[in-house]
Amino acid sequence: MSDLKVTAIIAAAGLGKRFGEVIKKQFMLLGGKPLIVYSIERFEESELIKEIILVVSEDSTSYCQREIVDRYRFKKVTKIIPGGEERQHSVKSGFDSISNDTDVVIVHDGVRPFVTVSLIDEVIRECLKSGGAIAAIPVTDTIKKSSAKKHIEDTLSREALWLAQTPQAFRYDLLKIAYEKTAIDGFLGTDESSLVERLGVPIGLVPGSQMNIKITTHEHLLLGELMLKDGRKLLKINAEKKEKK
């Protein structure tokens, strides 16, 4: 797949209102580094990724160039694009900047710092089979359907339910058609898969990870610090085991 052109769009244009801080959530520090840096690092490491496009709020483009791309010396980041009012508009802005010789577009949330290279590559490979694929995890909790008055209407079977994550990858031509259709229909989706699904294209489900959390609150940030600490501890233990051998 050396001749395959895969472009990654990392969406980080959110305002972070749930944090209630001056600094946006995607630039909050986790283990001493801005959240978004972890995602970019993993996409830089993937040999399948040819370029990375960052989508941030318009007032953050200069900051992102200086404090993220330049400071951490990222090589694959080719553009920093100002986002729109909704996530769909932001990712579309990033998509519009991609050349039409691109084969696959993979989209990831900039506030999911624990994505792995193996998950990125697996989603891309699954996408090549049918045209689209997303990372997701099976629902394990009991799901209740609520009425408008917040009374239980039904208990849903969780056997066929999955929680969508990112990354999500699609063939360039299919995502292009999906965006054209949404413009005509005025449809607003919460992720890219919901747009492509409307074309009747089968989207593959790639088992994600409980670790692949989306950090949107202070509680999530604290959890991320614990996960990062335990991860470093595990790496240290493994390194010590190798030295003893």
Image: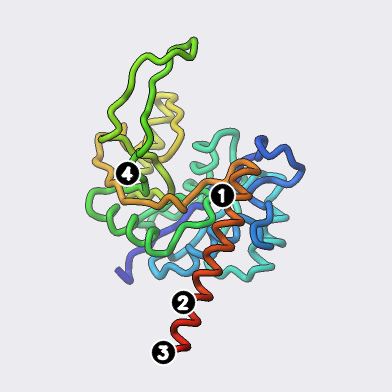
Where the C terminus falls, by quadrant?
bottom left
Nearest to N terminus: mark 1 or mark 3: 1
Camera-side mark, 1 or 2: 2
- Type of residue at label 4? Leu
Residue located 67% across and 35% down the image = 17
Quadrant in which residue 176 is drawn: top left
Q: Spatial distance from mark 2 to mark 4, Cα to Cα? A: 43 Å
Asked if residue 232 shows in the view, the reply is: yes
- Under tag 4, what secondary structure? helix
Near mark 2 (Cα within 10 A), the count class, few <14, some 14-19 or many ≥20, is few
- Image location (x, y in percent) of residue 141: 38, 35
Camera-side mark, 4 or 1: 1
Camera-side mark, 4 or 3: 3
Q: Are marks 4 and 3 in contact (CB under 8 Å)?
A: no
Q: Are marks 2 and 4 in contact (CB under 8 Å)?
A: no
Q: Is residue 196 above or below residue 225?
A: above
Quadrant in which residue 121 is drawn: bottom left
Q: Spatial distance from mark 2 to mark 3, Cα to Cα? A: 11 Å
Residue located 36% across and 45% down the image = 137
Where the N terminus falls, by quadrant?
bottom left
Q: Are marks 4 and 1 in contact (CB under 8 Å)?
A: no
Q: Are marks 2 and 3 in contact (CB under 8 Å)?
A: no
Q: Which mark is residue 245?
A: 3
Residue underneath mark 4: 174
- Type of residue at label 1? Val
Residue underneath mark 1: 111
- Under tag 2, what secondary structure? helix
Residue underneath mark 2: 238
Camera-side mark, 1 or 3: 3
